[in-house]
Image (cartoon, rainbow, N blue to C red):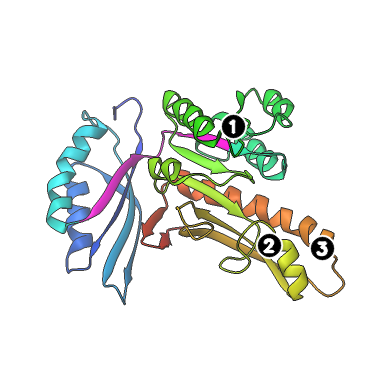
Amino acid sequence: MISDTIPENVVLLLSCADRAGLVSRISRFIYERDGNILDLDEHVDPVEKTFFIRVSWRYESASFSLSELEAAFRPLGTEFDASWQIRLSGRKTRTAIFVSRYDHCLQELLWRHSIGEFPVDIALIISNHPDLAPLAAHHGIPFHVFPVSRDNKDEMEQHELDLLENNAIDIIVLARYMQVLSSRFVDRYPARIINIHHSFLPAFVGSSPYRQAYERGVKIIGATSHYVTEELDQGPIIEQDIMRVSHKDTLDDLVRKGRDLERLVLAKALRLHSEHRILVNGRKTVVFE
């Protein structure tokens, strides 16, 4: 509930076919309801002629709920034939982290969460191994083990889905989770599963990108965070970064250096998502930083 005692910032993410007057109409909608715009960023794809906007505004006092605000905006969204969502930036995104045995990405997310850097609530951690249970316990986060195998994958995934639903999870983060999610699982959370891949996609997809990079003698390595789709490592890219390497670097050097990239790239992707700064456009994203 938006109230005069707890004012909240409101964020609109919208995309539609480009046309004249879109920014003006959206701004007037906010103004007519006594909103004060804090930030507005828009982009037009010159090839697809598609308009994208992220606008954040604030109510010093309001007597209506989020659902009422959405209902009021719906006719405008329908008129624009737009894809849109309205979020309250003061509400933390309920997050589940999936992890296997590597702990570097999980450590980074837990540390940033502990200092309040993310507007997220890490509700639980799910793993196919028990190794990182002590780390979760140290941070006071429930840790659940589902030992996935080829024979029980469907059963384990159903248990995981039930757990996620019972905990009202908004976003899933795969922090070097070494299992491929089924299409049934992915379909339940469209554009709400973030993965970290240890290469600069689209190069070196699959399970051993550092070895592939080493064997090709690359001069840069990278990490990519993307939304998960049914097609392995092909989802819309959220964030990427690179680091220079040379002929002097061994395979172990590439892995060691790459871990730093993985940690930072995944953390940034989660922050961008939780701050409602990403619009998915087919196989691409528009990221308002």
Secondary structure under the numbered disc 1 in the rendered image:
strand
Horizontal side, residue 16 vs residue 276: left or right: left
Q: In percent of the image, x 74 and y 26: which residue is there?
A: 134
Q: CA distance from mark 2 to mark 3?
A: 11 Å
Number of numbered callouts drawn: 3
The disc label shown at residue 209, or none: 2
The front one of 275 and 227 is 227
Q: Position of residue 190 (x, y in %)?
A: 39, 47
Residue topped by disc 1: 126
Q: Amino acid at mark 3?
A: Leu
Q: In percent of the image, x 72 and y 44: which residue is there?
A: 104
Secondary structure under the numbered disc 2 in the rendered image:
helix
Horizontal side, residue 148 vs residue 3: left or right: right
Q: In percent of the image, x 42 and y 61: which residue is there?
A: 285
The disc label shown at residue 251, or none: 3
Q: In percent of the image, x 62 and y 59: which residue is there?
A: 206
Q: Is residue 244 visible?
A: no
| Outermost right residue | 248
Q: Amino acid at mark 1?
A: Ile
Q: Is residue 82 above or below residue 45?
A: above
Q: Position of residue 178 (x, y in %)?
A: 64, 45
Question: How many other residues sit within 10 Å of disc 1, few (<14), some (14-19) or many (≥20)?
Answer: many
Decide which of tag 3 and tag 1 comes sooner along the chain: 1
Q: CA distance from mark 3 to mark 1?
A: 29 Å
Please give the range of residues in magenta: 82-97
Secondary structure under the numbered disc 3 in the rendered image:
helix
Q: Position of residue 65 (x, y in %)?
A: 24, 30
Horizontal side, residue 235 vs residue 87: left or right: right
